[in-house]
Each structure stands twice: as C-alpha cells, then as structure tokens.
Amino acid sequence: MPSSASSALSGKVLQNPAPDTVAHKNVAIWLFSCAALVFIMVVIGGLTRLTESGLSIVEWRPFTGIIPPLNDADWAALYAKYSQYPEFQKVNAWMSVDDFKNIFWLEFIHRLWGRLIGIVFFIPFVWFLAKRSIDGATKWKLWGLFILGGLQGLMGWYMVMSGLVDRPDVSQYRLTAHFGLALVIFIALLWVGLNQYAPRPVGTNGSRRGLQLLCLIVFTALSGGFVAGLDAGYAFNTFPLMDGQLIPDGLYVFDPTWLAPFEDHMTVQWDHRWLAKLTFVLVLVFWWRAGKWDLTSNQRFATHLVLAAACLQVALGISTLLSVVWLPLGVAHQAGAVVLVGTATYAAYKLRRAN
C-alpha cells in the first residue's frame, strides 16, 4: 500500500473512535444524566422539607400514585385522609382544600420525580444490556445501583411514616438516612459514569487524600440532615458566635449525653457549624498541597472546582443561618452540599491511582 494511502487510512482510524469507546461514552452520558436527575430530586426534597409539604400525601402507592387528583371529589377524599393525621390536627387545622393543594402538589412532584429517575435508569439499562454495551463488572455495579434506587423509595416512605404517628414531623434519623442514601446513589452514578468515560486515570499522591476529603464532606452534609430534621437552623441565627459565645452554655446538656449530637437543637447546630469549618479548612489544605503535586491540567482543574464549591457552600450556609432559613437560601444550601459532594467525587476519581 502506498504511504499516502496508508497515512490516509491511519488518519481515518484515528478520527473514528472504536465502537467500544463510543458505547462506553454513551453509557457515561446516561449515568451523568441520571446523576443530574438525582441532584434535582434532592433540591425538590429540600423544597418539600422547608415548605413542610412532605406529609401531605399519607399513602404510598408506587404505581397508581402517578395519577393526580382529577376532580373535586378526588381532592375532597385526599383532604379527608390528610385531616386524620397529626400534622393537620396539630398544625394545619386552619387549611382549606385550596390551601392543602399548595402543599400536595410539591410532594406529588417529589414522588413523581423519583419514579421518573427509576424509568430513566431502567429502560436505557435494559437497552445497553441488550446491546452488550456494558462489561460484566459494570453490569453488576449498575444492578446494585438499581436496587439502591428501589431502597431509596422505601426509605422515603419509611421516613414519611414517622410523621404520621404522634409528632407532626419526620424523624431526623430517617430524614438523614434518606438524604445520605441519595448522596451515595449520586456519588456512585458519577463514579461509574467517570469510569466509563475515562477509565484509566493518572495516579497521583493525592488519591487517598481525595477520598478522605470526600468522606468528610459527606459526613458534614449528613450532620446538616440532623439540623434540618430538628429545624435547628431556626435558632441561634448569629455568626461567628452562637448565642453570643464561641462555646455556648448548654452545649451537650442532654439526657442521655450521647444523644445530644442527634437530638439536642443547640448541640446539633454547633456540631454542624464546626464540622463545616473543619471541612472548609481541610479543603483549603487539600487545594494548597495539590498545587505541589505533579498534576495534569484536568486534575488541577478538579481541585479548583472543589475549592470553588466549598467557598460557595460556606457563603450559602452562613447566609441561610443569618436569614433564619429564608426559603431560597435554604434550598440553595442543600443544593450546594450536593454540588460540593459532586466536585469532591470528581476530584477523588481524577486523583486516584490507576489499577
């Protein structure tokens, strides 16, 4: 073959990626899309929580629940069911049917979005399996993700059930578990997607530190779940001091003491504040040390993203506190937590050592 023809053929091969590479990138785009839907789901969940709409639907109907109320009789039946539970009887007895509709629609959208995520995940998953676009190891990871998604639906209903008994509010333990499982699913979708898109990262000295930082960020976010579950953000709305003190009186004054980090409003908020401060300092240290590592431009960009997301989240956290949890800021703060988790996941993946 003439050299010119050989060069042309070589150029053509280079310009057309292998079918396996294209298939892997298609899988990655699908998983990134699912992660984006999970992000939106967490934002809707935060909005539902802050508007106290989450207990407006008192039944769990995984399949028939996709049908909204279609007439006045449907609305009257739903309102009558809601009126039998503590939130209506102790907090919202003033509500008319029209008032009830406002909180109903947000929870309905929240649940409907969860079903949408299941469909967007499952149908392409079956398609990719049929096309043999997913290797054996990845296939089992994705089956695991599918199971986690189903468990998240169960966890959501388990959380709602805790607010339908005596206290007209969900358990902070179940709320945090529900949020934590959402973060696990979000991280896993990103990680598996990144592995499909760029399966052979360049290892660095920061691989372990990136994972450690990600764990700390998730832990701090979970401590925020207890703040939300106890409505602890509506008290002690000053910064940097708390109740006029760096270490306020009454901290860890709870019986039993070991439950204070989970059930005492002051302690829960104080813990979250200091975990957030520690996390931010360690993000700064991580970013500063990363500047001395031999990184690629993509890896260095990943560390910059973590720093930017951490700065934004700190600003949102302080603003949310000082505003006494103004709704837009409260929702933005929850969204910021997921953004920070996402950037930390990206950085941890990019810095990890190749197998």
Image (spheres, rainbow, N blue to C red):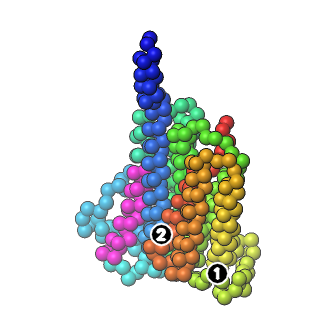
CA–CA distance in space, label 1 to label 2 = 22 Å
Q: Main secondary structure of the magenta part?
A: helix
Q: Position of residue 7 (x, y in %)?
A: 45, 21
Task: Please name whichever residue, 146 or 223, is drawn nearer the observer in this view of the structure.
Answer: 223
Q: Is residue 151 visible?
A: no
Q: Position of residue 42 (x, y in %)?
A: 48, 60
Q: Is residue 62 above or below residue 226?
A: above
Q: Mark 2: few, some, or many residues within 10 Å (few <14, many ≥20)? A: many
| Residue positioned 68% across, 67% down in the render | 281
Q: Are marks 1 and 2 in contact (CB under 8 Å)?
A: no
Mark with earlier residue (1, 2)? 1
Q: Position of residue 40 (x, y in %)?
A: 44, 58
Is 286 left or right of 194, judged from the image as shown? right
According to the picture, the residue beneath numbered tag 2 turns out to be 331
According to the picture, the residue beneath numbered tag 1 turns out to be 240
Quarter of the figure that contains the N terminus: top left
Magenta residues span 97-118
Q: Quadrant of residue 355?
A: top right
Task: Please name whichever residue, 85 or 147, is drawn nearer the observer in this view of the structure.
Answer: 147
- Given the current orientation, which residue lies at the most extreme top position? 1
**Amino acid beneath label 2:** Val
- Pair 1/2: label in front: 1
| Residue positioned 38% across, 82% down in the render | 94
Q: Mark 1: few, some, or many residues within 10 Å (few <14, many ≥20)? A: few
Q: Secondary structure at mark 2?
A: helix
**Amino acid beneath label 1:** Pro
Q: Secondary structure at mark 1?
A: loop
